[in-house]
């Protein structure tokens, strides 16, 4: 498995088919909850990191925020740009690797959503953007990380699943190896198979909190779902951490 597996996978047209169930409703719930908890002014500057197909970017722009968004995938940026135009939303998109973000602009909120974390080979690379984000925030600005809950994943990992979308068979095989969730995704279109991979390092709440505090963040909230429910180590599917500069 290649260390840069994400380049091929996120550039493929198949990626959005596999995650078709992650629609605008999830983004809407999370955005509503987050903005209720942090309460930033309507015209605040927001950075949507690893923005994918632009679900969050467009929602935030439509709420009156000045949104900048980036992703490594040209395919996803193209989809996001078309979606923003369709919704008549003003979002500035650009292409960047999470480890190499270079911006002069400062933000009031930086969002790293939908498990866009833990893709790289070591802790230094994985936490590189969180460290970068601190310098990109205005004083008292917020950083929000939406990640999976390590304990929940370990207890509830589904080794195999399959589904059919638009006559395409999607098979997913999962295992945990060296504290990392490895997923093999097999796309079968009428006998023509393509194989992709995903890899996410499992980080627990305490380790992430320690790293964020070392960077300088003050932790202002932790919750376990997109509705803002209390984080339960054994049962929450998500780990959502909000830090403030």
Image: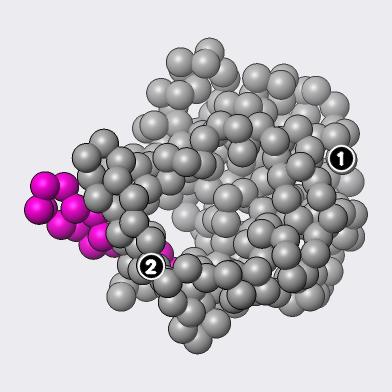
Q: Main secondary structure of the magenta part?
A: strand
Which one is earlier in the sequence, the residue at label 1 or at label 2? 1
Q: What residue is drawn where x is 41% and y is 23%?
A: 82
The one nearer the camera, 210 or 95, is 210
Q: What residue is drawn where x is 77% and y is 23%?
A: 43
**Alpha-carbon span between mark 1 and mark 2:** 39 Å
The question of residue 32 being in magenta is answered with: no
The one nearer the camera, 28 or 101, is 28
Residue 86 image point, x, y percent: 46, 15
Residue 99 image point, x, y percent: 53, 61
The question of residue 190 being in magenta is answered with: yes
How packed mark 2 is, by other alpha carbons closer than 10 Å (few <14, some 14-19, many 20 or more), is: few
Q: Residue 224 is drawn in which quadrant?
A: bottom right
Q: Is residue 127 above or below residue 100?
A: below
Closer to the camera: disc 1 or disc 2?
Answer: 2
Q: Is residue 55 above or below residue 51?
A: above
Residue holding disc 2: 160
Residue holding disc 1: 38
Residue 1 showing in the rendered view: yes
- Span of residues in magenta: 186-199
Q: What residue is drawn where x is 56% and y is 38%?
A: 69
Residue extending farthest to the left is 191
The one nearer the camera, 139 or 210, is 210
Q: Is residue 44 left or right of residue 100?
A: right
- Identify the secondary structure beneath mark 2: strand
How packed mark 1 is, by other alpha carbons closer than 10 Å (few <14, some 14-19, many 20 or more), is: some
Q: What residue is drawn where x is 67% and y is 46%?
A: 111
- Identify the secondary structure beneath mark 1: helix
Q: How many marks?
A: 2
Residue 202 image point, x, y percent: 59, 74
């Amino acid at each position: 498995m290649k260390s840069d597996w994400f380049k091929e996978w996120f550039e493929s047209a198949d990626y959005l088919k596999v995650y078709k169930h992650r629609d605008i409703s999830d983004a809407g719930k999370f955005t509503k909850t987050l903005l209720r908890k942090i309460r930033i002014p309507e015209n605040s500057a927001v950075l949507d990191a690893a923005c994918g197909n632009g679900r969050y970017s467009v929602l935030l722009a439509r709420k009156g925020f000045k949104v900048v968004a980036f992703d490594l995938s040209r395919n996803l940026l193209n989809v996001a740009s078309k979606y923003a135009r369709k919704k008549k939303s003003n979002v500035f998109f650009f292409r960047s690797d999470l480890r190499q973000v270079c911006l002069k602009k400062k933000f009031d909120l930086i969002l790293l959503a939908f498990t866009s974390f833990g893709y790289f080979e070591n802790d230094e690379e994985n936490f590189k953007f969180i460290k970068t984000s601190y310098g990109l925030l205005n004083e008292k600005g917020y950083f929000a990380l939406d990640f999976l809950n390590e304990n929940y994943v370990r207890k509830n990992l589904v080794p195999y699943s399959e589904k059919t979308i638009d006559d395409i068979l999607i098979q997913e095989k999962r295992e945990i190896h060296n504290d990392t969730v490895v997923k093999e995704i097999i796309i079968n279109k009428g006998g023509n198979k393509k194989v992709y991979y995903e890899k996410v390092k499992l980080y627990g709440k305490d380790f992430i909190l320690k790293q964020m505090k070392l960077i300088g963040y003050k932790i202002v909230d932790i919750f376990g779902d997109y509705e803002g429910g209390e984080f339960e180590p054994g049962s929450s599917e998500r780990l959502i951490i909000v830090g403030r500069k």
